Amino acid sequence: QVQLVESGGGLVQAGGSLRLSCAASGSIFSINAMGWYLQAPGKQRELVAHITSGGSTNYATSVKGRFTISRDNAKNTVYLQMNSLKPEDTAVYYCNVAGRLRVGVDFGSWGQGTQVTVSS
């Protein structure tokens, strides 16, 4: 079983910064993709940023140039550096990790979510 623990959310003024972390633990053989998603009240969960095992990244258009996703493979951790935050970034942010437990057994797990609130 894989556990994901998120941290780093909070309340910040518009223009401020936050850094989210998501650490994966358990009997993990390898991790492939890692990503961050957000879910605003009454809306569907949507992709914010994604990073592959090789370090390739992609971002939602709304966050390009402001957010940076990175990963530390030695720590099984993914980060999201959020700069120039806007009130419309307010949402619950979830990390998602996909990988392999052992040969032939893949996993995909979600973090518990962390609230990010940006005040105007």
Image (cartoon, rainbow, N blue to C red):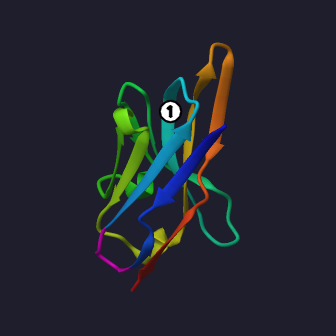
Q: In which quarter of the image is residue 16?
A: bottom left
Asked whether residue 83 is drawn in magenta, I would say no
Residue 79: x, y in percent? 38, 50
Tell me if mark 1 has few (under 14), some (14-19) or many (20+) residues whose alpha carbon lies within 10 angstroms of its own: some
26 vs 96, nearest the viewer: 26
Q: Which residue is drawn at 50% across and 29% down?
A: 31
Instruction: Determine the residue located farthest toward the bottom in the rendered image.
Output: 120
77 vs 51, nearest the viewer: 77
Q: Is residue 14 left or right of residue 2?
A: left
Residue 32: x, y in percent? 50, 28
Q: Residue at x 35, y 30 (%)?
A: 55
- Quarter of the image with the N terminus is top right
Q: In this view, does 56 lie above or below 22?
A: above
Q: Residue at x 53, y 41 (%)?
A: 25
Instruction: Determine the residue located farthest toward the front in the rendered image.
Output: 27
Residue 94: x, y in percent? 56, 56
Residue at which label 1 appears:
33
Mark 1: amino acid? Ala
Region of the chain picked out in magenta, as a range: 12-17
Badge 1 element: strand
Q: In this view, does 36 lie to the left or right of 78?
A: right
Magenta segment, prevailing SS (helix, strand or loop): loop
